[in-house]
Amino acid sequence: MLGAIIGDIVGSVYEFYNIKTKDFPLFREDCFFTDDTVMTCAVAEAVMNGGGKDDFIDAMKKYGRMYPNESYGGRFGTWLMSDNREPYNSFGNGSAMRVSPCAWVWNCGFTARTGCLPSKAMEMTRLCAAVTHNHPEGIKGALATADAIFMCRYYFGGYHGDFQQPINNDTAECKRRIKEHIEREYGYDLSKTLDEIRPSYRFNETCQETVPQAIIAFLESTDFEDAIRNAVSLGGDSDTLAAITGSIAEAAYGIPEEIKDKAYSYLDETIKDVLRRWNEFIA
């Protein structure tokens, strides 16, 4: 969850002033958290409250109204401030940028025992998207992001099945399996390199033109900071790209303490309180 927030903060100043390089100050004085952070916190609270459909709707509307001036998408902003509780068939990348808390309650032990992804947790993840983004592409983007986060937790965490050896000492093999799974299950093309994507990539708020690029930014990374720099360097919807990449990279690499400390300096007490409660919850 914090990985998504850090990506959001770092990318915030480049969303409408894209850069195409990894050489930039990671945190600028004018960085700030955006709607991506607010909605990630809303999802975390919803998960802590049970992860049902009404929990997601209530939490999103609560936090959206607490932070009414964030850069929400047009239809999402209208939904937040209305009494409407029905989805509106969106395939925007908001379903993927906010989903990370769901992936942290998926049970690695269950998968190690059965070889299957936990269906109940996946359904909660689907609900997290579908309360607004119920278009198949909106749901797919959220599920693919959550799968990538979970598989990083699983492989980089040293889990394995009864007849397998852990592969957490082989970063390339961990990433190969994650890439293969995402391509097979969701049909995303993860074959292009960042250098191939970067020159022509432009601002795009759809899942199908954000989630694959964010995953590739992780796959090419060497550590957490490098993953964030990869995502921002693509241009496009920089804060959301980096939020998605950061959420995956956190699960693989963890987050250096100095980056955590700096990120907290941009957060208000409400967001910090959600993070405190979340850390206690997942512990």
Image (spheres, helix red, strand yellow):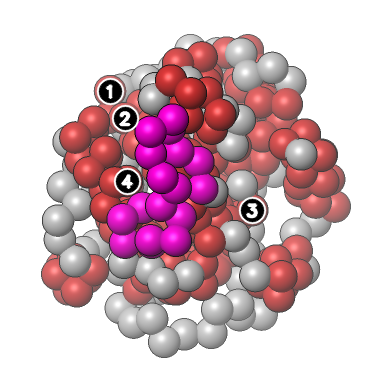
Residue kind at label 3, given as amino acid type: Leu
Give the secondary structure at mark 2: helix
Label 4 vs label 2: CA separation?
Answer: 16 Å
**Which numbered circle lies on residue 178?**
4
Residue 171's quadrant in the figure?
Answer: bottom left
For the residue carrying disc 4, how many other residues have a C-alpha within 10 Å: few (<14), some (14-19), or many (20+)?
Answer: many
282 to 47, vertically: above or below: below
For the residue carrying disc 1, how many other residues have a C-alpha within 10 Å: few (<14), some (14-19), or many (20+)?
Answer: few
**Which numbered circle lies on residue 140?**
2
At 45% from the left edge and 16% from the top edge, which residue is drawn? 119
Residue 248 image position (x, y, % from top left): 47, 51
Q: Can residue 126 be seen in this view?
A: no
Q: What stretch is highlighted in magenta?
A: 158-174
Q: Mark 1 points at which residue?
A: 136
Q: Main secondary structure of the magenta part?
A: loop
Q: Can residue 164 be seen in this view?
A: yes
Q: Which of marks 3 and 1 is in front?
A: 3
Give the secondary structure at mark 4: helix
Residue kind at label 4, given as amino acid type: Ile
Label 4 vs label 3: CA separation?
Answer: 21 Å
**Mark 3 or mark 1, which has the lower sequence index?**
3
